[in-house]
Amino acid sequence: MLIETCFTPQVYNLFHNPNAIVVVIDILRATSAITTAFYNGVHKMLPVETLEEAHNYKKNGIITAAERNGQMVEGFDLGNSPFGYMNAKLKGKTVAITTTNGTQAIVAAKSAHEIVIGSFLNIAVLSEYLSDKKRDIILLCAGWKNKFNLEDSVFAGALATELMKKFSFSTHCDSTIAAIELYKSAKYDLYDFLQNSSHQKRLAKLDLERDIKYCLTLNQCPVIPIIKHNEIVKAEI
Ligand code: 3SL
């Protein structure tokens, strides 16, 4: 089973493999927020690309989360903070969601055999789930506005390391090798390694240090959100 890493959704078409499982990665913060939502009992999420689509869901009475450039968009119910989902009122509910990059990456991979949501919060259960599936894996980093970003690439390296060390995965892909090398430098202190990264700085300016630290925590939420028929649901594990 082979692992490939795509550093930005812009070039996903170069990596597409109809038999592979795609892991969508947006560590700060979309895939961390989605993982947290399911861990806290959200029933289903509807990922959309545009604010217009999100507005339509909101008009139809669906709880809707919308983030652009790190901030909650006015008029919606939630932004993109994982802490927003630690709310008993959301248990059993459906939430529509649009974010700057994370939901765009989910939509970009829609023709994949299967799409799963990856984050540091679910890395251990996710690697076991992927190993049971016995398929090639594409690690799809959401990046920032179609550019490379550090935190998603470090996570791709962490997951690839885990899959290659504990399970029978291998790689011939230079971007995966690069991600593994990044993770080797980052793993002793993820927060410190990412201090100068553009998105960590952007979120810190918005006073979101607490979100950053939480999103870099390992295995807090042992659930696997997967995409089925364009909706995010919790996989049975
Ligand atoms: O880009 C995204 O999808 C978001 O995760 C960005 S933010 O962390 O909410 O700013």
Image: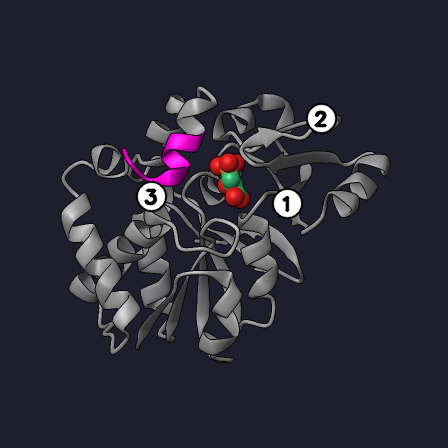
Residue at the right extreme of this rendering: 59
Q: In what element is the residue under mark 3?
A: helix
- Residue type at mark 1: give it: Met
Q: What is the x, y in percent for residue 232?
A: 60, 51
Of mark 3 and mark 2, the one earlier in the sequence is 2
**In the drawing, what numbered circle is on residue 181?**
none
Residue type of the residue flagged with mark 2: Glu
- Specify which label sits upstream in the sequence, 1 or 3: 1
Q: Position of residue 106 (x, y in %)?
A: 56, 57
Query: Could you tell me which secondary element the residue under label 1 belongs to?
Result: strand
Work out which residue is located at the far top of the displayed protein and give it: 207
On the question of residue 221 being in view, the answer is no
Work out whether 24 lies above or below 195: below
Determine whether the residue tagged by mark 2 lies in a helix, strand or loop.
loop
Query: Where in the figure is residue 169, as x and y percent of width and height?
Result: 25, 72
The residue that mark 2 highlights is 74
Magenta residues, dominant SS class: helix
The tag on residue 45 is 1
Q: Is residue 199 magenta?
A: yes
Q: Nearer the viewer, mark 1 or mark 2?
A: 2
* Residue 226 placement (x, y as % from top left): 53, 56
**What is the magenta range?**
195-202
Disc 3: residue Cβ within 8 A of ligand 1's nearest atom: no
**Mark 1 Cβ inside 8 Å of ligand 1:** no
Distance from Cα at disc 1 to Cα at disc 2: 20 Å
Residue 76: in magenta span: no
Label placed on residue 120: 3
Q: Earlier in the sequence, mark 1 or mark 2?
A: 1
Task: State the image quarter where residue 178 is shown.
Answer: bottom left
